Image (cartoon, grey):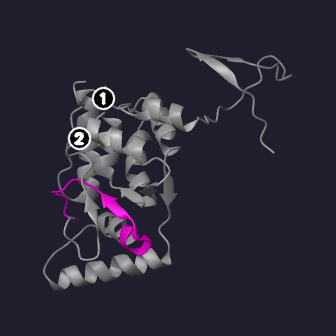
Amino acid sequence: MPIIIKGVVNGKTIMLDDDPGLPQGFRATLHLILEPEKALQLSAGAWADMTPKQIAEFEELMTELDGRPFQVPGPDPS
Amino acid sequence: MSFLLNRDMVVAYLRNVAPVVGRVAQHRGSLFLSAVTLMGLELWLLQVSTPVRHAVRFQAMLQLFSVASIDEPVAHRAASIGSKLRAQGRRLTTVELLVAGTAIERGWSLVTRSGSPLAGLPGLTVVDWSAP
């Protein structure tokens, strides 16, 4: 049974709502589970800030996969 | 009605193409992604030069989709499509055949740009959400 402890993200720190009772320094893995509305908010436009280098790498990889040019669409200005 | 998003539309959503974002929000709960599309996108996400935040947001997006496996009926359907096209002198890539096979086999509409090589395949309903 997975143990779910909720918390609030603050940069690289997550303040848990409850004390997990784990020893100091214990390494934990974060599995992100989101409400659908939050999932939409976080993901829509999430790649809008890709750098030109990232776009070039992405297009090169997809073009290699497809055997035909793949073009990344530009983000809407809004 | 259920929708299978092709890679171009997934990227459009992630790149904030407004009509696509609106349609994804509208059809939440009936959205699918092929496992082969997932593979292509994760190829880039897993590169060391790709920032982790892109993968985190992508995982958030996946919570809006169900991932469709490539199973035996899809493989048969993809082969059938490819074979008929080859007889006409047309070619699609393995990825494209598997995406088309998934949509046709499951009875889903394929969401991709209207100029896609997949547009016009017999038995495949194609919709373009990027058009305003």
Q: Quadrant of the N terminus of chain B?
A: bottom left
In the image, A50 versus B6, the foreground residue is B6
Residue located at (61% from left, 34% from top): A32
In the depicted view, which residue is nearer to us: B103 or B59? B103
Using the image as rendered, state which of residue A50 and residue B47 is in the foreground.
A50
Vertical order, A70 against B92 (above or below): above
Asked if the magenta segment contains residue B108, the reply would be yes
Q: Which residue position holds label 2? A: A72
Seen as rendered, the residue at the extreme left is: B89
**x then y, percent, for residue B97:** 31, 70
Which segment is the magenta one?
Answer: B102-118
Q: Is residue A47 visible?
A: yes
**Residue holding disc 1:** A50
Relative horizontal placement of residue B124, taking residue B86 as reference (left or right): right
Count of labels in the image: 2
Q: Are marks 2 and 1 in contact (CB under 8 Å)?
A: yes
- Mark 1: amino acid: Met
Q: Position of residue B131 (x, y in %)?
A: 19, 46
Taking the magenta stretch, the answer to whether it contains residue B47 is no
**First in residue order: circle 2 vs circle 1:** 1
Percent across and percent down for residue A48 are 31, 29
Q: From this viewpoint, is residue B17 visible?
A: no
Q: Which mark is drawn over residue B125? A: none
**Amino acid beneath label 2:** Val
Q: Chain of mark 2?
A: A
Q: Pointer 1 indicates a residue of which chain?
A: A
Where's the C terminus of chain B, which quadrant? top left
At x 79%, y 36%, the residue is A3
Q: Which residue is pictured at 51% across the width and 37% down the height?
A: B60
Q: Mark 1 packing: few (<14 Cα in 10 Å), some, or many (20+)?
A: some
Residue B23, image quadrant = top left
